[in-house]
Image (spheres, rainbow, N blue to C red):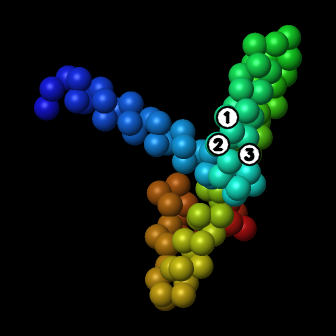
Amino acid sequence: MRTWQVERRKRTRHLIELGGLVVKAGIVELTNDDRAIIYGALLWIAAKLQSHERDHARNLWAAKGKQAFNAERLEERKDQRIGESARGTCAKPQPTQAVGSMQPSISD
């Protein structure tokens, strides 16, 4: 594969991931898929990041995004455990947890 093809695929994947964030945040549904509203909101974000409020906005949005990613991760783990118990399978103990150990795990 040629270098330009590899770079094009990387760029395409990156754009798809960014679009996925727009969907994941609920922006598409909340705006009824109105591209002008979505673009306007993104322009507002860009303006905010160019203003004197840049650092505050970045910190606030980064914290909110990390919180959402963590909540999603916890929900996925919970769903995974529910699925395993429904199938009658159990998750194997983590390498740091001894079977029968008195130390509480994250799920305790």
Quadrant of the rendered structure where residue 60 is? top right
**What residue is disc 2 on?**
35
* Element carrying mark 2: helix
- Mark 2–mark 1 Cα distance, whole angstroms, equals 6 Å
The reply to whether dot 3 and dot 1 touch (C-beta < 8 Å) is no
Specify the amino acid type for callout 1: Tyr
Query: Which percent across, then down, holds residue 66?
Result: 69, 41
Q: Nearer the viewer, residue 66 or 10?
A: 10
Query: Which percent across, then down, holds residue 9?
Result: 31, 35
- Sequence-first disc among 3 and 1: 1
Please state if 84 lies on the left or on the right of 22 as rendered.
Answer: left
Callout 3: 10 Å neighbours few (<14), some, many (20+)?
few
Please state if 14 lies on the left or on the right of 69 as rendered.
Answer: left
Q: Nearer the viewer, residue 13 or 106?
A: 13
- Mark 3–mark 1 Cα distance, whole angstroms, equals 25 Å
The reply to whether dot 2 and dot 1 touch (C-beta < 8 Å) is yes
- Note whether 87 is above or below 103 in the view shown: below
On residue 67, the disc is 3
Specify the amino acid type for callout 3: Gln
- Mark 3–mark 2 Cα distance, whole angstroms, equals 27 Å
**What residue is disc 1 on?**
39
Which quarter of the figure is the C terminus placed in? bottom right
The reply to whether dot 3 and dot 2 touch (C-beta < 8 Å) is no
- Note whether 19 is above or below 89 in the view shown: above
Specify the amino acid type for callout 2: Arg
Say which residue appears at 55% left-offset and 84% top-offset.
Answer: 85
* In this view, the mark in front (3 or 2): 2
* Element carrying mark 3: helix
- Note whether 35 is above or below 101 in the view shown: above
* Residue 71 in sight here: no
Say which residue appears at 49% left-offset and 72% top-offset.
Answer: 91
* Element carrying mark 1: helix
